[in-house]
Image (cartoon, rainbow, N blue to C red):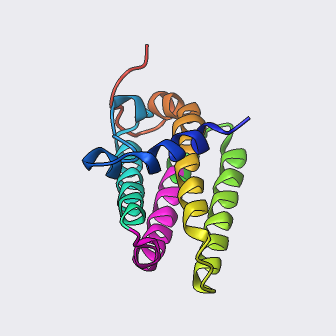
């Protein structure tokens, strides 16, 4: 069985025209319900769309040169913000979620190392990883704490999912 991300990405590479450049069209369904984190997830989606567009134009390596340091900085800041909010709200699954963050950061570092060594095969795998991370982490794992933070934290809720 082909994973959902692989099927979707394969379809994206066959598209032509302006729609082919947008991998993730940000919408309300992407929100977890915490304004600051939703804005950060939207930024992640924009970076991913930028990388996707560059790849479609045959500029994956050049885009990765600029993208990976920017993405690493963004990821560090975002994961710290998430964990600080979870800690302040005494989120009971903080340690498990923190481990997911460590795994994500480790994978991203491994992709950066491959890029630095000149591995041209890394770009499609990196795009697949980032796309999958957006959907499996940001939209699934992060949703688990979105309502908790809204009820127990000091963060501003964007919307109610009732």
On the image, the x and y values in percent for residue 57 come to: 36, 66
For the residue pair 135 and 18, the one nearer the viewer reads as 18
Q: Above or below — where is 131 with respect to 156?
A: below
Residue depicted at 67% across the width and 72% down the height:
110
Q: Is residue 74 magenta?
A: yes
Task: Report the side of 67 relative to 116 (left or right).
Answer: left
Q: Quadrant of the N terminus?
A: top right
Q: Quadrant of the C terminus?
A: top left
**Residue 108 visible (yes or no):** yes
For the residue pair 121 and 79, the one nearer the viewer reads as 121
For the residue pair 106 and 33, the one nearer the viewer reads as 106
Q: Main secondary structure of the magenta part?
A: helix
On the image, the x and y values in percent for residue 103 come to: 70, 58
Q: Above or below — where is 70 with respect to 134?
A: below
Give, as a single range, the part of the protein colored magenta: 58-82
On the image, the x and y values in percent for residue 21 come to: 33, 52
On the image, the x and y values in percent for residue 10 come to: 53, 46
Residue depicted at 60% across the width and 55% down the height:
129
- Residue closest to the far left: 18
Residue depicted at 38% across the width and 20% down the height:
160
Q: Above or below — where is 57 with respect to 147?
A: below
Residue depicted at 52% across the width and 53% down the height:
84
**Residue 88 visible (yes or no):** no
């Amino acid at each position: 069985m082909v994973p959902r991300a692989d099927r979707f990405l394969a379809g994206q590479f066959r598209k032509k025209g302006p729609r082919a450049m947008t991998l993730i069209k940000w919408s309300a369904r992407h929100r977890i319900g915490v304004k600051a984190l939703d804005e950060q997830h939207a930024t992640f989606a924009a970076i991913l769309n930028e990388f996707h567009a560059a790849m479609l134009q045959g500029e994956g390596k050049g885009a990765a040169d600029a993208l990976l340091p920017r993405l690493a900085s963004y990821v560090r800041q975002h994961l710290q913000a998430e964990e600080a909010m979870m800690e302040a709200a005494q989120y009971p699954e903080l340690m498990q979620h923190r481990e997911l963050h460590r795994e994500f950061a480790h994978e991203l570092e491994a992709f950066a190392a491959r890029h630095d060594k000149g591995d041209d095969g890394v770009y499609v795998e990196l795009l697949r990883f980032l796309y999958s991370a957006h959907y499996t982490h940001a939209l699934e794992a992060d949703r688990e704490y979105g309502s908790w933070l809204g009820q127990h934290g000091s963060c501003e809720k964007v919307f109610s999912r009732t």
